[in-house]
Image (cartoon, rainbow, N blue to C red):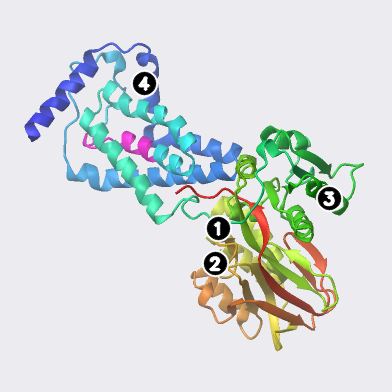
Amino acid sequence: MRTLLTNLDRRTFERVATREWPGAQRVLPRLTRSANHGLLWFGIAAGAAALGGRPARRAALRGVASLAVASATVNTFGKRSVRRERPLLDTVPVIRQLGRQPFTSSFPSGHSASAVAFATGVAFENKWWGLALAPVAASVAFSRIYTGVHYPGDVLAGAALGAGAAFAVRGLAPTRAQLAPPARPQADAPALPGGRGLVVVANAGSGQRGGPRPDRAQEVHGVLPQAEVRECGGPDAQPLEKLLEDAADRARQLNGALGVLGGDGTINAAAAVALRHGLPLAVLPGGTHNHFAYDLGIETYGDAARAVETGEAVAVDVARFRAGPHREAQVFLNTFSIGAYPELVRIREKWAGRIGAWPAGVLAAWEVLRTAEPLTMHVNGKRRAVWMLFVGNCQYRGLGLAPVRRHDLADGVLDVRVVHGGRLARTRLLAAALMGTARHSPVLSEARLRGLRIEDLPPGTDLAFDGEVNAAPSRLTLEKQNEALTVYRLLPEW
């Protein structure tokens, strides 16, 4: 059987070598050289990371990780386990042959493994991008036979290893689709084909980092052509709160929904209005970070538009804080914090894209704790010296010191994390962060609560919630409101 397969492999190789392939002579030798050491795929990944958004960066990272696993498997296991000589070049036209012939074992093809691993890894994040890369990956694999450096069996084995590497990476690091927020509890929301009945308030200033001002109305109408759009942020525009109230009144007249395009601060304001008017909310991620939209599973305008048109929605928790029993409560959808946490997040996000989330978290902890001073306050009746107090609306994942995202937006709890002051607290916490054990440090306390009381805050203390910073009163009460807000979100297909 082995001899039969070997003979078939050689005959197929010879057929490829002796056949004329129109146009291949100018393309395939150059393509196979460009894929040496994965340079072609690293270039594509770098371009996607630089020019694309968050989904493109995530796809590029998964593709590179899959390539790395495939390459390591081929070079440390595959080529050392099976010693196979390279094909003889007698039947391969000289013009096709590479200037420098490989000298390692022919089995399996490392180029094919890397190509398939990268394309498959990208496809796990976005099937359409994966399909676009598939012809390039197939061409790289075929070029190894065309230029005479591999038998077809080598290429097929390499492709199988590459696909297996991508599946292995997905098993270790599930895709966002695998970890999508639970589609529960489902909520009733009107289906609005084309956006008819949806009134969107768009913040023209959200997410801008230089460059021309975006036409937010055009962006919305590109995915929901019949939606009404009211833009804020211009020199003659009304205040955001007034626009949201007017938009909510109009949405109720249309028996429709309130929409918002902007960052977390804008979405926070829209959520408060939607709650008061009993309206479902459509979130279009148009800010810099879009934490709430991403945790909800809405990464593009198209995601939001499809949910609006089909009427797919879920109920999510809302957290509130108030300065007293007779004071109006303010809403937060993501996080509330006192102390150094806002500065820690700013530093972490500045460096995370360059050095990775964990090193950036350590750097941020060092910088913040090096300069910050603890605050003395009462937390649920107990006097505490606190460097930072973090409260998340639902439980966050990630490092204990700097949580990064949520999986469930309706779990009924506040995620409370406190970094205490005290003797050697700074040194102990930094040591724990460096060793990756911050979650277990006695300096850090974590709890999942329904409510929280904060009293005797020093004058001049600031609080931050959903990207907004305000002066803090001396006393605060935080509480949950379970499944209070209906938000459009695509439900998973079963």
Vertical order, 219 against 366 (above or below): above
Q: Residue at x 28, y 43 (%)?
A: 74
Disc 1 or disc 2, which is closer to the eye?
2
* Res 248 seen here: yes
- Residue assigned mark 2: 399
Do the CB atoms of the residues marked 4 and 2 lie less than 8 Å apart? no
**Which element type, helix, strand or loop, lies under badge 4?**
helix
- The residue identified by callout 4 is 28
Q: Secondary structure at mark 2?
A: loop
Please tell me which of labels 4 and 1 falls first in the chain. Answer: 4
Q: Quick one: label 1 or label 2, which is nearer the N terminus? A: 1
Of residues 312 and 382, the one nearer the viewer is 312
For the record, the magenta segment spans 103-117
423 relative to 167 in the view: left or right: right
The CA span between labels 3 and 4 is 62 Å
Kindly identify which numbered label has been placed on residue 249: 3
Q: What is the three-letter code of the residue carrying label 1?
A: Ala
Labels 2 and 3: the sequence-earlier one? 3
Q: Identify the residue at horizontal 59%, vertical 39% (top origin).
A: 50
Where does residue 345 sit, x and y in percent of width and height?
66, 61
The reply to whether callout 3 and callout 4 are in contact (CB within 8 Å) is no
Label 2, label 3: how far apart the Cα atoms are: 42 Å
First-in-chain label (1 vs 3): 3
Q: Position of residue 20 (x, y in %)?
A: 28, 11
Proximity of marks 1 and 2: CB atoms separated by less than 8 Å: yes
Q: Is 235 displayed left or right of 107 in the figure?
A: right
Q: Earlier in the sequence, mark 4 or mark 2?
A: 4
Q: Quadrant of residue 270?
A: bottom right
Residue ranking furthest to the right: 236
Q: Hey, what amino acid is under mark 3?
A: Asp
Image point (71%, 69%), residue name: 337
